[in-house]
Image (spheres, coloured by chain):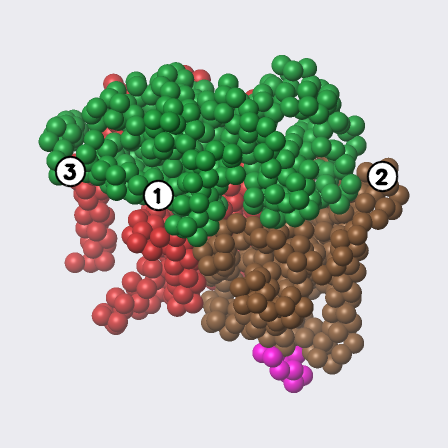
Amino acid sequence: MIRKLAMTAATGLALTATGAFADVVIADVAELSGAGAAAGAVWHDGVKMAVEEINAAGGILGEQIDLREYDSQTDPQNSRAMVQKAIDDDAYVLLGTVYSSSTVVNMLVAQQNGVPQLTGSESPTITAKGNPYIFRTAFGAQKGLPKLGTYLKDDLGAQKIAVIWANTEFGKGGHDAFMAVAEDLGLEIVADVPTEQAQVDFAADVAKLASAGADAVFSYMTEEESARFLIEAEKQGLGLPIVGDTVIASQKVIDLAGEAANGVASHVGLTAEAPVPAIQEMAAKFQEKFGYGADHNAIKGYIGAYTVKYVTEQIGEFDREKFAETMHGLCLDAASHPGVLMDVCWDETGEMSRASFLVEVVDGAQTITKTLPAN
Amino acid sequence: MSEFIQLLLSGLSSGSIYALAAVGFTLLWQASQTINFAQGEFVMIPAFFVLALSVKLGFPVWLAMPLAIILSVLILGALFKRLIVEPMHKHGTIPLVIATIALGILLKEMVKEFYSPLGQPFPSLFPQDVFSIGGAAISIPDIANFTIAMGTIVALQLFLSRTRTGRSMQATAQNPDVAEILGVDIKRMVMYTFLINGALAAIASILITPVYLAKFSNGEVLGLVAFIAAIVGGFNQIRGALVGGLLLGVVDNFSAAYFSSEYRQALPMILLIVIILVRPQGLLGTSEGRTV
Amino acid sequence: MTRKHVHIAFAVIALALLIFVPLGQKNYILYVLTSWLMFSIAAMGLNLTLGYAGQISLAQASFMGIGAYVTALITLAGYHWVFGWLAAMGLTFVIGLLLGYPALRVQHHFLAFVTLAFNTIVFLVLRNEDWLTGGNHGLVGMPRPDFFGISTGRNLQFYYFVLVLFVISAGVFFWIVNSPWGRAFKALRENPVRAESLGVDTRRITLLAFAIGSAFGGGAGAIMSPLVQFIEPGSFALIHSLKILLMVVVGGAGFFYGPMLGAAVVILLPEVLRFTDGYYLMIYAALVIVLMVYSPSGLIGIGQKLMQQIRPRQEVRKDMAKGAQL
């Protein structure tokens, strides 16, 4: 066993030393099937597009990227197995997974094996575990929500907030982060309503929010649930400002909820509609290549693949240990690293910071109302 | 008070749809001892028939909906019976249960792969106007759903008790051997039941999907609810399934509002266990009918 | 050679393969093999309930969950894994009795419905009681046990550790179905009315079969904690109980090797059908339906049919030909 490991390590070294004919393996472990396919498949297309661009431009340090895909089936245990498999296949860096419930499991394996991992997950827990190999491609909810809290307090003048959230790994992370923000800002939580995954009937939840005497509602759920909630809220005439993070103002929710989505305000980390030429260019190219619009997951995947290139070129060799070391505290500016699309920095925990946006849904379209500086 | 009325009325509206699914479930059990674990998917699928016909093939919605009902009757009724239930019937109940579990997975995966993994908006038959009753907001679709679902079930009940075919179907369900001696074409009667289940599922689907949005996973929740409604109400009675469905709709809302949002799904389960222990034939069921 | 010799030879060869095949394999293969052994144990338990006692249990994943959480809590508190394992099996056995007793008392097919409800309730408790179970975030960092100074921390050592548990479980299972008691099951399955008239207390042995089957689930859960080193409620939802149920039926309910074969199919199929992209679940589901039409006694049933065509002299056992029935 040990001899075998040593041999793999030796072959790995030999590859990096000679390097001429060997490609560098980058593994994308994503939700290609199962409940998370909508997020994971789009992320994967973003990765694929970036890798093709990088390869066309000569690869990383002169080596072509051999992109391997691994399907987690949106199952945490299977994602763990797939990360193990990717590492057995001698992956240089891992990209994925998008679902936090999977990432918290499989990042342990990457850590044990010392393989850097760039995840698309936004749950606060990911970077709170002291794992030196995990890095984000979009900042965690705990970074975005203070921006939203300030908006609630200062722009809307709201004091009493009702909270509705998905009782899952994803929703719980956002919920807890928002609760912390509310406490910091002195906002009063007058209703705290957890909802089920794939819940279809929101009548009781909206009735609860309506009778809570709130000034505004904070919503943290996935796409379909957000849309169903908005439809029911309109039906019952909730009449309160509804704010959320990323999902609630996404195009999918707008398509599903129709008029009920109008007036929703949201903080958005990444959006294809962002007033950033590089992002719009990337989104247009994506649309042309895959025949559907890029969303935040596509952009995350795209940025993730480019980050691997930039960091590796910075250290000048394929070294996982150095890769992780270098990324902690690293800043990449978009001017000299166009693939990251926007200026970005990573801290010591792998958390990232980047400018973000405040959007409002007006007449069935996402409209940027404010660009918020990185924090 | 207005919250209470809101919860009650919304619960009855969703409950009437659960009742439709539960009635179909009960009919299948009575006629052929089929415990259909794919019943939720049967309600999920017809909405995608409508979408495929209208969005993909360009049929107008008013035509797509009746066509979807016909498709459901043929595929979820006749084809299901011919291809899956009939060849398996001789093997007993368990293989059929397993096959319907697999069928549920198959239908879900097909919609996800061939249509879309994302939720889809779905056209409503009715204007979305909302008016207020005692402070509670009630929409025209709410009232229409309730009325159509109840009307369908009452019509079905009348058909079963007043027409010759209906009575033959009931006789087949209660005692196939005697029915056969009396000259009833049992096979045909059982087939009718499957066709009716296909139609009920399609009606439920068209009514509920504007609110639920069309998504491949919708059947998971619906199937479980229909299942529980049928058992709680009484597995061998149509009116049992009706009461069970309405009860579950209301219980779900009340438990979310007054008991615990986190445990809202537990209450129907506890209700199920209690009913099985205390009154296994269900609230309205009769123990001398064929039991599960 | 007699039939018995053939069986022994087969078991010895299978065991030798299980010992030598993993040598030199990569971590991923070891992980897959280990989880196959784990699911085989859970499926074996359900086989007792389904294949021998003729009861559908839709809660095997929740028993695994209870076992996994109990073991996780005990090992995280610093006690040895063995205590977790014993507690997991003991607790799931008792819960099996408590759950099965009233359900089987009323009308024996209601067990399916009661277990269905039970699985949902267990999921909710695991998710909602943060203070105990970690809620949505689950529990993480369960240690892999040491035995007599030998660590099972590495994947190969852990595989052998699970293999030992698997052999013990299979041995217990074999002993049960071949004891007088297990023969009572066979009598029950072949002819319930006759079994009862011969003095077999069907209700009691059915209840015991369910409780023991549940304890196998708990035992498999006790393996999951140190294997994955992370557990969360979603891994024990109803869909996973259905998955284990399909393992048993696909392999062949009522056959000794059925659940092992079924677990292998479920765990390896995504790998084999990888070229089909997202279609593997569809193909699997369609195969299950076809299997139920042609051979409700599963893959082993098909194997037996083929064998009979080669050796037509052997008489078909009535119960095997019929497969599991309510």
**Figure colour of chain B:** brown
x and y, in percent, of residue C8 in the image: 22, 50
**Figure colour of chain A:** green
x and y, in percent, of residue A268 in the image: 55, 32
Q: Which residue is mark 3?
A: A22
On screen, residue A276 above or below B72: above
Q: Is residue C7 left or right of residue C59?
A: left
**Figure colour of chain C:** red
Kindly report which numbered mark, 2 or 3, lies closer to the viewer in this rendering. 3
The residue furthest right is B134
Q: Residue at 65% of width from left, 85% of height from top?
A: B183
Q: Residue at 30% of width from left, 21% of height from top?
A: A324
Mark 2 vs 3: CB contact within 8 A: no
Question: Within 10 Å of the Cα at label 1, are there few (<14), some (14-19), or many (20+) other Cα atoms?
Answer: some
Q: Is residue B280 left or right of residue B110?
A: right
Q: Amino acid at mark 1?
A: Met
